[in-house]
Amino acid sequence: MNNLNWDNVRYFLAAARTLSLSAASRALDSNQPTVGRRIDALETQLGLRLFQRHSGGLTLTVDGQRLLAAAELMEEGAADAIRASQSDDSTIAGTVRIAAPEGLGVCVLAPRLPDLYRRYPLLDVSLEPSAASADLKRGQADIALRLFRPTTADLVSRRLCAMGFGLYASADYVVQHGAPGSLDALPQHAFIAYGDGLREQEENVWLEGLMGRGRCLFRSDNTLTRLSALAAGVGIGVMPHLLMAQPGCVRLLPQHEAPSRTIWLVVHGDLRHVARMRAVMDFVADVFKDHGASQ
């Protein structure tokens, strides 16, 4: 595989991970014909058939599966090279890519970015709110917020704060249905809960234990979708306190708390001493310190 075009390999990786030309084109911010041409060029260079194409998408051939393992090593090597080129940077300027869960990225970090830009006017931030965890080893982001502590040796994590949860509803819901005066009153109400993918999260298990025979009218694994349904008056939900600076939403039964989660700030070890990474990490830590102090 000498003199392989790395761009062609990138397109192959995206197609191999999504098993769809259209999905790969979206992941690469490209278009389907370009993805197809890149893969064709790689197959021609190698003299191998990497995919079987069919109406349902793509299937990796045996040769494609072998190349996938090698291509992932190339990807890690490319990310290592980028990190090495950044390691002696002492200027607080340039781009920092942050990956974060949707709720934390949209409701907590994004509103505070003007403060960061005032402090460091030469910085650019790429914020990617997503339910999926970005792979820092493969260079998918520079730093990440996670709700679990990573165990990978190359990653360095910093505890930011505990994220507490409680019961919330919209003010309109309370006007129409009343506020439960005790846990025993909850089964008379309607609820918003997590979907099947996150149903076993501790805070959702806690909520479902309180529902009793109450009706669960809406489920979603997406935090912002649940928040939107709650604000619209669909029912009572369990929400992180730090997302609930929302006009028209009220906390219910504040003496009762769901199990909390810990928020971790994670960076690849090769980047932790880069000046702009340190600056953004310190800023993010301050943001969550403010939220933690206000709960």
Image (cartoon, rainbow, N blue to C red):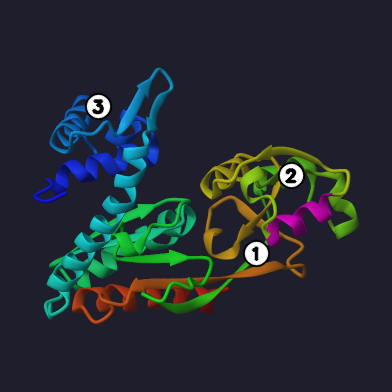
Front position in the image: 246 or 162: 162
Residue at the left extreme?
3
Front position in the image: 77 or 165: 77
Q: Earlier in the sequence, mark 1 or mark 2?
A: 1
Mark 1 to mark 2: distance in Å? Answer: 15 Å
Q: Which residue is mark 2?
A: 191
Q: Is residue 294 above or below residue 232?
A: below
Which label belongs to residue 165? 1
**Residue 241: image location, x then y, percent:** 59, 64
Predominant SS along the magenta part: helix
Quadrant, the C terminus: bottom right
Q: Which residue is mark 3?
A: 32
Q: Which residues are magenta?
A: 202-211
| Amino acid type assigned to the residue bearing label 1 in the image | Phe
Between marks 1 and 3 in the image, the one whose residue lies nearer the viewer: 3
**Residue 168: image location, x then y, percent:** 67, 55
Does residue 198 appear to the left or right of 102 in the view shown? right
Q: Around disc 2, counting alpha carbons within 10 Å, would you say few (fewer than 14), some (14 to 19), or many (20 or more)? A: many
Q: Is residue 111 at all visible to an observer of this figure?
A: no
Does residue 156 appear to the left or right of 46 in the view shown? right
Q: Is residue 39 at all visible to an observer of this figure?
A: yes
Front position in the image: 273 or 124: 273
Does residue 250 appear to the left or right of 40 in the view shown? right
Q: Is residue 58 magenta?
A: no
Q: Earlier in the sequence, mark 3 or mark 2?
A: 3
Secondary structure under tag 3 reads helix
Secondary structure under tag 2 reads strand
